[in-house]
Image (cartoon, rainbow, N blue to C red):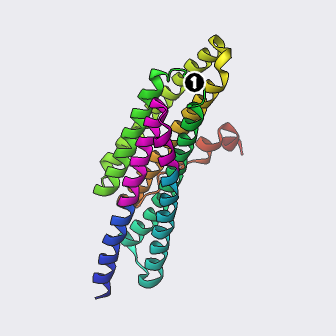
Amino acid sequence: MMTTHLQRELERLKRKILALGALVEDNLRLAFNAIETRNVDQAQRVITTDLVIDQNEVDVEEECLKLLALYQPVARDLRFIVAVVKINSELERIGDLAANIGERAVQLATEFPVPVPHTMAVLSDRVRAIMEKALDALVREDAVLARVVLAADDEVDDLYEQLLGELKERIRGDLDHLDAVVLLFSVARYLERLADHATNIAEDVLYMVEGDIHRHQFPDTPAALFGAEAEQE
C-alpha cells in the first residue's frame, strides 16, 4: 500500500516539475523576444512571472523533502527525487536569468536602438532549443536525448565567442552608443549561462536514468589527473 502511495506522489511531483519547466521555458521565450523587439510590456511580464517561478520552486522542494521523510525511497525512486531537487534549483536559476534579460530589455528600450547582432538571435535559438531538449529528456526520462544536449554545448560556446567578437567590433566602431552595446554584452553572458544550466539538467536526467554522476568526470589515474609530477612521486 505504501508503495502505491509513493508512486502516486511521485507522479504528482513529476507533474509539478514539468509544469515549472514549462513556465520557465515560456518566460525565457518572452525574455528573448523582448530583447529583439525592445518590448517593455513583455519584459515587465517576464520580471513579474519570476516571482511565480520562485514560489513554485519552493513548493517543489518542500514536496521532495516531504517524500524523503515519509517514504524513505530507495534505488530509482530515490534518484528521481534527488534529480528533481537539483533540476528544480536549475530551473529557478534559469528563471532568474530570464528576469535579468527582461531587465536588460527594459534598459535597452531607453537607449539608442543599436541592432541586435544576428549571431545573438542564432545563439538565443540554440539556447532555447537545447533547453527544450533538456526538458523533453526529463519528461521522457531519455538518456539519449540528454546526451544530445551535452553534445550541443560546444556549438553554443563557439557562438558565444563569435558574438563577443562581434560586440567588441561594434564598440570599436560606435563609441557613441557604448551603453547599449554593454547591455547586449550582459545578455550574451546570460545566454551562455543558460546553456550551462540546460547542460546541468541533462546531466541530472542521466543520473536519474542511469545512476551515474556525470558532473566533474575525472581521469582514473593520479598521473593523468596531475601530470608528470604524480608519476614522479
Residue drawn at (39%, 62%) of the image: 17
Q: Main secondary structure of the magenta part?
A: helix
Q: In which quadrant of the rendered view does residue 104 lie?
A: top right
Residue drawn at (67%, 37%) of the image: 228
Residue 146 against residue 178 in the figure, above or below: below
Q: Is residue 195 visible?
A: no
Q: Is residue 56 left or right of residue 179?
A: left
Residue drawn at (43%, 63%) of the image: 84
Which of the two residues, 9 or 58, is positioned nearer the viewer here? 58
Q: In which quadrant of the rendered view does residue 112 lie?
A: top right
Where residue 99 appears, x then y in whole percent?
Answer: 53, 47
The residue wearing badge 1 is 164
In magenta, the rendered stretch is: 19-47
Q: Amino acid at mark 1?
A: Leu
Q: In which quadrant of the rendered view does residue 103 lie?
A: top right
Residue 160 against residue 76 in the figure, above or below: above
Which of the two residues, 210 or 146, is positioned nearer the viewer here? 146
Where residue 89 appears, x then y in whole percent?
Answer: 51, 59
Which of the two residues, 184 or 73, is positioned nearer the viewer here? 184
Where residue 64 appears, x then y in whole percent?
Answer: 45, 72
Residue 13 against residue 41 in the figure, above or below: below
Badge 1: few (under 14), some or many (20 or more) residues near its Cα, within 10 Å?
Answer: some
Which of the two residues, 167 or 31, is positioned nearer the viewer here? 31
